[in-house]
Image (cartoon, grey):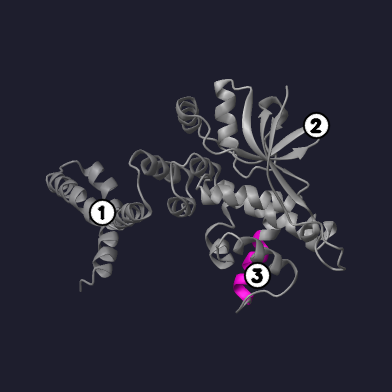
Amino acid sequence: MSRKKQAISAFDKPRVQVPGRARAERAMVVTTLEDLPLSDIRPNPDQPRRAFDEEFIAELAQSLQDVGLQHPINVTPDGDGFMIISGENRYRAATKLGWETIRAIVETNVDLSDYKLAVRALTENVVRQNLNAVDETEAIFKLIQSRAAETLGEEEASKLDYQAIEQTLTRMRNHLDGEPTDGLPLVIAEVIGQFGWSWRKFSQKRAAIWRWPAEIVDAMRARTISLAVAQILQGIKDDKRRAHWLKRAIDENLGAIALRSHLKEEGRQALRPAPKQARTLAPRFQRALTRIEKLDDSKLAEKLAPRLERADKLLAEIEKLLGDE
């Protein structure tokens, strides 16, 4: 299928090579506006978003059908076709409609390293608030790995699984008074800082998400609970109790403040078993003592004697705890 092509702009004329200047700074950037076959386009495999809202895509498809595509997608040449830089929702909606082509801004001869491409994809999603907290955090971890490979070398980057990144962030938080100046801590701070986030807050609130209970992570991916609610729920160690409060948080659309309030009330109720038991034990004791006083069975009285002695001792212990003389 033919491609309709229209030049938009060309800037950054080729410069004379200057030792030490970044390759991207020397590169000539050319963008063109083209109608591309959808069959020639593929999503970015490193797209930070893992969960796509099918209902939203259906609504977007209806919008495309009603008013057309208002904003072209952005792509870059990739092998025999093109890879999406931004606009995957629009691409999916157009595919759903059975379109054969889509208007796209093609960025040719752009020095887009894997890291820069990933930054652009994540930036667009963060700005548009397309990502859930899990996908955002996972994308940041992958960016740290990619940036470490570029600046510290592949060998150093190969050691960076999610646990290693979390542990480094924890050490940074515990031992750094200011900002990091070199090595992996600097890489981590710079990557997180690109999105306007504090690495300290990221360490406290997000760095451990990868090892939270699966049902909590799944609920965040589905956007049925917020990050703040998830932080509270993941701290509940008992599986059944955590599942109970997760269900309530989803069913009742509880925010973090409301959930904390419910959990505090639950804790207060757990600390008040004695008055409730006293109300049920008092009539039982009274009935038992009345029957014992009227007892005329010597054998049964003999069996009851040691038990009454134990009851007397327990009562003495209770009186002591209550401060009775």
Q: CA distance from mark 1 to mark 3?
A: 60 Å
Numbered disc in front, either 3 or 2: 2
Q: Which residues are magenta?
A: 166-175
Q: Label 2 crowding class (10 Å Cα cut-off): few <14, some 14-19, many 20+?
A: few
Q: Nearer the viewer, residue 218 or 313?
A: 218
Q: Regarding mark 3 in the picture, which secondary structure is present there?
A: helix
Residue 133 position in % (x across, y down): 53, 49
- Amino acid type, label 3: Arg
Q: Nearer the viewer, residue 13 or 124?
A: 13
Q: Along the horizontal axis of the image, is 291 left or right of 94? A: left
For marks 3 and 2 on the same chain, the one whose residue lies earlier in the sequence: 2
| Predominant secondary structure, magenta span | helix
- For disc 1, the marked residue is 308
Residue 131 position in % (x across, y down): 53, 45
- For disc 3, the marked residue is 171
Q: Along the horizontal axis of the image, is 265 left or right of 33? A: left
Q: CA distance from mark 3 to mark 2?
A: 45 Å
The verdict on residue 183 being magenta is: no
Q: Nearer the viewer, residue 194 or 180?
A: 194
